[in-house]
């Protein structure tokens, strides 16, 4: 009882995957070269934007999320949301904590492991 | 009313401004919850009696709550919860921001003892003397693991983190002696890490502090209580030196950097020592105390395990005094001296 | 009771229990019902082992000084009590036993989505249990089940094997969670829409979401502590700039949702048993179903209320305080709905109903003190004292264990085809409820007095309350022993229960008890929701 | 992952079985994301605390080699996509070949990464108490390398696991097991490999390009 052949268009065609592969390579080189400019705080923002674009390209097309609706997308969306939830509260805690309660306030911590 | 509720709920006496505020919110929360729970319990009991099963084939109507009852189920409890949160959070923020004019005290927690030192005055182990009706700010740090400064009578608790400072404050309102406990699990004798906060009248406290600074407290107090060993920082180092001679440490450990049977004590504190097993450790307080109590635990490379065990012979404060003495042995300039090879030539004086 | 007499009362000749009697047929089974029974045996063993450690702790507290064990042994006992009870009993208790057994039957499926993976979860549980028992025999860790650094990374006791045991057990939880999510999503019977799912299935779905999303972070944290303890990577080492509060963030990110893994299935059980005992539809099905999801998702935002005094920032304390209040409303919706279900019902007082009353009392009491402890300023006094111990034990032993016992009694006829002895059931229920109150009310008062947790020795003024609490705990212990005895006896001597002893309209009662290997003679078609008692009795889901 | 080529008895039909397998795999990928969430949270905290040390230590790492590693992993992902395409069109020979290419890229990544580790071992840039790298002595330096080794180490373990799964799939593809009616296993193995690639896509800029 082999089910009917799935219509061609709703799956990733080799041509489109090759094109996405090329875009990913270009983005990799781009993120490397941009980082050499040492733009200060902007390096993190640019690097993250490019990484998110690359990751969503891989997730949507290579991992076929583009062609599957519903619960599958929800599962990974919640997992990623929880990642940011955890990071947000941890960094918020470190930033708003009593300043001397941070590891940097350790009097003996001059070098990586003491004076 | 306050006393009645305090006794009913087994709460300790309210000995600080914060305690009174917290307890009033506590009473409000407990009373509301008790009323609501009994109401829910009684309705359930009433439903059970009123609607018990009369026949096996009895069918019951399909009932679903109207939308307003549904929102009541959500909104009424939420309103209470959010009000409690608002009231509680304002008290909490107040607890976290000490008033400007508060008196500072440095607290150092160490595995199973508390040490208090006033900025330019004495320091004491296990007993904290504070004036009444004056805010006292505690700057707390720990030497090894997480402890927690907890005085039930003040309703104040604050974890003490190793290697960094946490702060809290309280304002005692009536003189007396209140127990201090460690509330964060910190090892074998976590339950013996007790202390005492003695609240004196302001004038009494000022005269005590003045005496302390003139160092006459020892005679005046007569025999200090067992765990109250009131010594000054300078005294501690001199005491450490006396204990080092008394227990014969200097027979094997030189204090001028010259090589001897044991590693030299000059610049020993926080020096990177390479052990027999190949790992390297930092000679911090924990290592020094451990080496006194159990010398064979970590032996520095190149030295023989000949050191006697001092566990049981050295009391806690004596060991602490010796560690303070070692910390005071610093050569100028501060450079990383690594222990050299041991040299065996007897000291003529023996 | 001759076997023939049993048969005409409706005891099926061949069912999942006698479908294969060799040991191999049990060890290599992929039948979700047998896996549920195997988990039941393991979970009850863990309950008695953990309970034994609890009793040893309680007897130590009869006198302030050393009573019969020394400090290090006491510290090891409360660590093992915590580890065994949390990971080996409470977390697998209802999802792995009743979730495994009933989920496929309730949604009209032959088995869970990945039956072999389900069997693998049993063996992963066994390997994890073996590691932890090995560590227990070798003295076990003395760090408490929370493993706070830097104590857990610097203590000389055996920490790594226990961490490895729990790490492995985490996979068993993840696999069970994934199995349930996929089963509910893809294998519901014909006509069974989401809004016709039994409320127990909703609760198991919420629990599975938490199991899948929370357990990996625990796995990582235990890995980090193990690596730190063995190799010294310095991630939590204060001298090197490590932050102990980071460990607490990661640990409680798992451990607070883990509390909901323990209580949510019990709420599902109570929704089912209340409807069956009152013979009435649940008062507001939609609200209870969505609040299960609400607890599962909002439960992840509130972990910081365990760290109000740990040195956490004021902003975080406020954020977590507010969010903790929002998670409370889902429980209050459920409580009001259960009480509402009794309205105009036809209630019969049976042992499951006794446990429902116990559950409601403990959940309301524990939930309210839980909200009180989440009020930021009150927590400063209560944190790490016996008040918090009493509060989470009210929810764990009170509500979750009452839910487990209600489930055990309510579905015992369905699982084993026999009825337990009703009289003894009520006796043990009252004994447990009284014993529980006698044990934990004194601990609330101890907490108010300021008695800290994990104290081997305690100031003399607390002694009278400790003695009262120990007396209560012996009462509790006897209650569990009585239950164990009459249930095991009922396995052999109980009268045949027949297809539907409670007259309940839950879907699982449409198949025979004990059910056949493939759950149904023919697959049911679902025409109405569960617990529709307004329909005439003969209308059922017969295909 | 699901060895049979035909529909398991408790599933209604092949589509339900594939949907079930896909949802189960994505839930598992969710757990992998959350497994790394703890490390990303630790990274975020320590980066905000010891910012200048992180910048110094990151500059010390070899970013060019990391870029090559990223390209290698993306090539591996592309190979797996082609393998999935061939499996769906029942060309098991090409499926096996592209799976082997993917395994090759995984091994190449591990080799390059091994070279980096050896370099760090030599110069002493090691985590925690093993840290004795003379050049960077500012506060938190050992913390950067603790995180570096933990994150890349855990990721490398996942690369090894992924390569193992793909090799096993390649071995089964060589015996012509996968066809239009049964290519679930290739899809699941591919999903896992793509996730390993996505995690590296985030690790690469965070560790090497600060």
Image (cartoon, coloured by chain):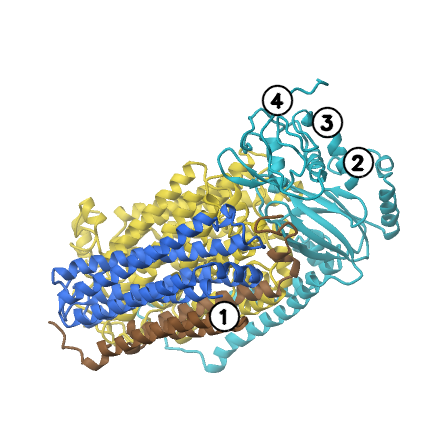
Chain colours: A brown, B cyan, C yellow, D blue
Q: Chain of mark 2?
A: B
The quadrant of the image that shows the N terminus of chain B is bottom right
Distance from disc 2 to disc 4, alpha carbons, whole Å, reads 43 Å
Q: Which disc, if any, is residue A44?
A: 1
Query: Circle 4 — which element?
Result: loop
Q: Are marks 1 and 3 on the same chain?
A: no
Q: Which disc, if any, is residue B245?
A: 3
Residue in the foreground of this view, choosing between C431 and B121: B121
Q: Chain of mark 3?
A: B
CA neighbours of label 2 inside 10 A, class few (<14), some (14 to 19), many (20+): few
Relative to B309, is B350 above or below?
Answer: above
Q: Are marks 1 and 2 in contact (CB under 8 Å)?
A: no
Along the polypeptide, which appears first: circle 2 or circle 3?
2
Q: Quadrant of residue C315?
A: bottom right
Relative to B83, is B22 above or below?
Answer: above
Distance from disc 1 to disc 3, alpha carbons, whole Å, reads 59 Å
- How many marks are shown on the rendered structure? 4
Q: Are marks 2 and 3 in contact (CB under 8 Å)?
A: no
Distance from disc 1 to disc 2, alpha carbons, whole Å, reads 60 Å
Residue C428 in percent (x, y) is at 42, 49
């Amino acid at each position: 009882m082999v089910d009917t052949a799935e219509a061609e268009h709703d799956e990733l065609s080799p041509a489109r995957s090759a094109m996405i592969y090329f875009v990913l390579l270009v983005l990799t080189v781009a993120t490397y070269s941009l980082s050499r400019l040492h733009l200060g705080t902007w390096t993190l923002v640019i690097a993250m934007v490019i990484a998110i674009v690359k990751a969503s390209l891989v997730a949507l097309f290579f991992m076929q999320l583009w062609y599957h609706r519903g619960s599958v997308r929800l599962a990974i969306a919640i997992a990623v949301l929880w990642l940011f939830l955890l990071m947000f509260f941890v960094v918020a805690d470190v930033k708003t904590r009593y300043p001397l309660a941070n590891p940097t306030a350790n009097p003996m911590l001059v070098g990586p492991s003491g004076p | 009313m306050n006393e009645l509720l305090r006794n009913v709920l087994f709460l300790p006496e309210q000995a600080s401004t914060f305690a009174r505020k917290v307890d009033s919110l506590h009473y409000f929360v407990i009373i509301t919850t008790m009323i609501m729970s009994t109401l829910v319990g009684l309705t359930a009991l009433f439903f059970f009696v009123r609607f018990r099963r009369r026949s096996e084939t009895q069918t019951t109507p399909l009932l679903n709550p109207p939308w307003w009852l549904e929102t009541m189920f959500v909104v009424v409890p939420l309103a209470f919860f959010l009000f409690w949160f608002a009231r509680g959070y304002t008290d909490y923020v107040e607890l976290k921001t000490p008033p400007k004019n508060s008196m500072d005290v440095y607290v150092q927690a160490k595995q199973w003892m508390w040490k208090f030192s006033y900025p330019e005055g004495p320091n004491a182990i296990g007993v904290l003397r504070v004036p009444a009706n004056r805010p006292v700010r505690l700057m707390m740090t720990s030497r090894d693991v997480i402890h927690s400064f907890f005085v039930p009578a003040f309703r104040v608790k604050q974890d003490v983190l190793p290697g960094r400072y946490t702060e809290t404050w309280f304002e005692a309102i009536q003189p007396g002696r209140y127990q201090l406990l460690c509330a964060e699990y910190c090892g074998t004798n976590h339950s013996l890490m007790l202390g005492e906060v003695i609240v004196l009248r302001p004038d009494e406290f000022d005269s005590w502090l003045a005496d302390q600074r003139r160092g006459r407290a020892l005679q005046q107090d007569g025999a200090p209580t067992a765990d109250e060993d009131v010594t000054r920082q300078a005294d501690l180092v001199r005491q450490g030196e006396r204990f080092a001679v008394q227990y014969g440490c200097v027979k094997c450990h030189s204090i001028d950097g010259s090589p001897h049977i044991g590693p030299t004590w000059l610049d020993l504190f926080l020096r990177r020592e390479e052990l027999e097993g190949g790992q390297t450790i930092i000679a911090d307080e924990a290592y020094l105390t451990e080496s006194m109590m159990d010398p064979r635990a970590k032996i520095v490379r190149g030295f023989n395990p000949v050191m006697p065990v001092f566990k049981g012979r050295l009391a806690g404060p004596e060991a602490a005094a010796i560690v303070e003495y070692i910390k005071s042995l610093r050569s100028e300039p501060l450079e990383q001296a690594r222990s050299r090879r041991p040299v065996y030539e007897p000291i003529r004086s023996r | 009771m001759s076997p023939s007499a049993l048969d005409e009362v409706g005891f099926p000749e061949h069912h999942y229990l006698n479908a294969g009697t060799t040991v191999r047929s049990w060890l290599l089974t992929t039948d979700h019902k047998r896996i549920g029974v195997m988990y039941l045996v393991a979970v009850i063993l863990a309950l008695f082992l953990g309970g034994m450690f609890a009793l040893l702790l309680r007897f130590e507290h009869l006198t302030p000084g050393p009573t019969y064990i020394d400090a290090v042994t006491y510290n090891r006992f409360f660590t093992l009590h915590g580890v065994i009870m949390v990971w080996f009993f409470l977390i697998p208790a209802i999802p792995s036993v009743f979730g495994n057994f009933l989920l496929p039957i309730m949604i009209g499926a032959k088995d869970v989505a990945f039956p072999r993976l389900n069997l693998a979860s049993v063996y992963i549980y066994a390997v994890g249990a073996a590691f932890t028992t090995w560590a227990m025999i070798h003295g076990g860790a003395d760090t408490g089940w929370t493993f706070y650094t830097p104590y857990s990374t610097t203590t000389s006791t055996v920490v790594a094997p226990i961490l490895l045991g729990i790490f492995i057990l985490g996979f068993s939880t993840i696999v069970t969670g994934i199995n349930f999510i996929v089963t509910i999503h893809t294998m519901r019977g014909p006509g069974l829409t989401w809004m016709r799912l039994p409320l127990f299935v909703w609760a198991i779905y919420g629990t599975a979401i938490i199991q899948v999303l929370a357990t990996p972070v625990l796995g990582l944290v235990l890995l980090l502590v193990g690596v730190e303890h063995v190799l010294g990577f310095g991630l939590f080492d204060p001298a090197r700039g490590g932050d102990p509060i980071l460990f607490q963030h990661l640990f409680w990110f798992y451990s607070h949702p883990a509390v909901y893994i323990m209580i949510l299935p019990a709420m599902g059980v109570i929704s089912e048993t209340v409807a069956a005992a009152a013979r009435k539809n649940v008062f507001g099905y939609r609200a209870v179903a969505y609040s299960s999801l609400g607890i599962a998702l909002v439960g992840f935002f509130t972990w910081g209320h365990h760290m109000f005094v740990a040195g956490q920032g004021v902003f975080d304390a406020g954020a977590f305080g507010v969010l903790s209040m929002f998670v409370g409303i889902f429980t209050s919706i459920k409580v009001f709905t259960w009480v509402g279900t009794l309205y105009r019902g036809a209630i019969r007082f049976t042992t499951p109903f006794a446990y429902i009353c116990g559950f409601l009392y403990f959940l309301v009491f524990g939930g309210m003190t839980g909200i009180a402890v989440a009020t930021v300023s009150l927590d400063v006094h209560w944190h790490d004292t016996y008040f918090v111990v009493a509060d989470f034990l009210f929810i764990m032993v009170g509500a979750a264990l009452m839910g487990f016992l209600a489930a055990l009694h309510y579905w015992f006829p369905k699982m084993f085809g026999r009825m337990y002895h009703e009289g003894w059931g009520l006796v043990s229920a009252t004994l447990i409820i009284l014993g529980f109150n006698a044990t934990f009310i004194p601990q609330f008062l101890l907490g108010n007095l300021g008695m800290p947790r994990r104290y081997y020795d305690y100031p003399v003024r607390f002694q009278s309350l400790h003695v009262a609490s120990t007396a209560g705990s012996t009462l509790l212990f006897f209650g569990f022993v009585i239950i164990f005895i009459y249930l095991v006896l009922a396995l052999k001597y109980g009268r045949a229960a027949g297809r539907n002893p409670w007259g309940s309209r839950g879907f699982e009662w449409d198949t025979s008890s004990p059910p056949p290997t493939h759950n149904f003679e023919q697959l049911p078609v679902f025409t109405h929701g569960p617990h529709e008692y307004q329909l005439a009795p003969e209308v059922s889901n017969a295909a | 992952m699901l060895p049979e080529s035909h529909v398991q008895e408790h599933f209604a039909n092949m589509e339900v079985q594939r949907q079930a397998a896909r949802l189960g795999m994505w839930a598992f990928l969710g757990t992998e994301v959350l497994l790394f969430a703890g490390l990303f949270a630790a990274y975020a905290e320590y980066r905000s605390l010891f910012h200048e040390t992180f910048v110094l230590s990151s500059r010390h790492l070899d970013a060019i080699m990391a870029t090559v590693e990223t390209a290698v992993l993306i090539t591996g992902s592309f190979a797996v996509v082609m393998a999935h395409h061939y499996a769906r069109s029942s060309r098991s020979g090409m499926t096996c070949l592209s799976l082997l290419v993917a395994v090759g890229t995984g091994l190449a990544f591990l080799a390059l990464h091994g070279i980096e580790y050896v370099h760090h071992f030599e110069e002493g840039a090691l985590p925690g108490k093993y840290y004795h790298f003379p050049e960077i002595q500012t506060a938190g330096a050992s913390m950067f390398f603790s995180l570096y080794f933990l994150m890349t180490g855990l990721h490398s373990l996942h690369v090894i696991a992924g390569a193992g799964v793909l090799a096993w799939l390649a071995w089964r593809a060589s015996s012509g097991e996968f066809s239009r009616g049964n290519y679930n296993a290739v899809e699941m193995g591919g999903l896992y490999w793509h996730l390993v690639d996505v995690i590296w896509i985030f690790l690469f800029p965070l560790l090497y390009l600060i």
